[in-house]
Image: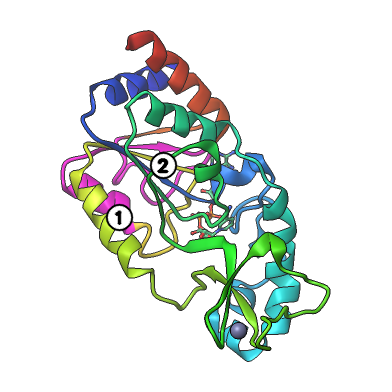
Amino acid sequence: MDDLIKKAAADLAQANMAAALTGAGASIESGIPPFRGKGGLWEKMDPMEVAHIDAFMQDPAKVWKLLVKGMKDVVDQAQPNDCHKGLARLEALGKLQTVITQNIDGLHQMAGNTDVIEFHGTFAWQRCMDCNTHIETRRVNVSEIPPRCHCGGILRPNAVFFGELIPHEALWRSRQVATDCDIMLVIGTSAMVHPAAMIPVLAKETGANVIEINPESTPLTGEISDYIIKGPAGDTMNCIVAELEKMI
Ligand code: NAD
Ligand code: ZN
């Protein structure tokens, strides 16, 4: 693993344009549970029952109770971990241009990355389903479920539910970044959610070196990624940044 960390640092040092794609695994060390895998939310509930747009439209109160309220409690308190801070440090060193994230927790921006593509939207804001007013999630009063806008409309996260389209701008820019980058770090994603899982595939097809950081193998491992560093995101990023700082 030490050799792979040195290799990743050397690859980053040489890259002209580096990008990262992050998933729920990047935020686990900030206390936000992932969907899949050990301790994941899907062990406790059926995704289609709670995170599909049809479920929300059918019974917004149920989805607020089972998923959104708990997520708000966790995300309101969450702070960036060493993975987020490491990616911000890479940007400060001029060694990372863009973060594409599937996460909706806003932690990359909080850590200091300035070009963050929120592929699945953001949980930082709720929007009214009737008048489209946007309200910061941490200001939403959850004493009434589902919470409502001043107009009486129901609030929903400004994030993408399963069954909804990816915001056009995010999709378009992500494709561009995947095509243009010569190295892509793929951190903490199970690569099971589409179309996000296609981003590293596009990067590979257009000539990028694809490096995974994940304690577990994924469908990309051995197929798309050049190598995988099997470790937790925070420690691994700390080690890569420390190696890189010795090289530049
Ligand atoms: P996922 O839940 O499907 O997979 C999480 C991945 O993280 C797994 O591959 C797992 O092996 C890996 N992992 C576990 N511990 C890790 C660690 N310490 N360091 C690095 N990796 C670790 O996540 P996903 O692929 O992102 O897909 C689920 C979708 O649900 C996402 O697209 C996202 O939109 C949403 N989601 C977001 C958040 C958030 O905003 N923080 C949290 C849960 C789910
Ligand atoms: Zn309204």
On screen, residue 200 above or below 228: below
- Magenta span: 198-226
Kindly tell me whether residue 58 is visible in this rendering: yes
Which residue shows up at 65% across the image and 87% down it? 151
**Residue 162 percent location from the top left of the image:** 49, 73
Name which quarter of the figure residue 194 lies in: bottom left
Distance from disc 1 to disc 2, alpha carbons, whole Å, reads 15 Å
Q: Is residue 243 left or right of residue 28?
A: left
Disc 1 beta carbon < 8 A from ligand 1? no
Question: Which quadrant: the C terminus?
Answer: top left
Name the amino acid type tagged 1.
Ser
Say the numbered circle drawn on residue 114: 2
Q: Is 52 in the magenta?
A: no
Kindly tell me whether residue 1 is visible in this rendering: no
Q: Is 221 in the magenta?
A: yes
Which residue shows up at 60% across the image and 59% down it? 35
Q: Residue furthest left?
A: 206
Say the numbered circle drawn on residue 174: 1
Classed neighbour count for the residue bearing mark 2: other residues with Cα under 10 Å, few (<14), some (14–19), many (≥20): some
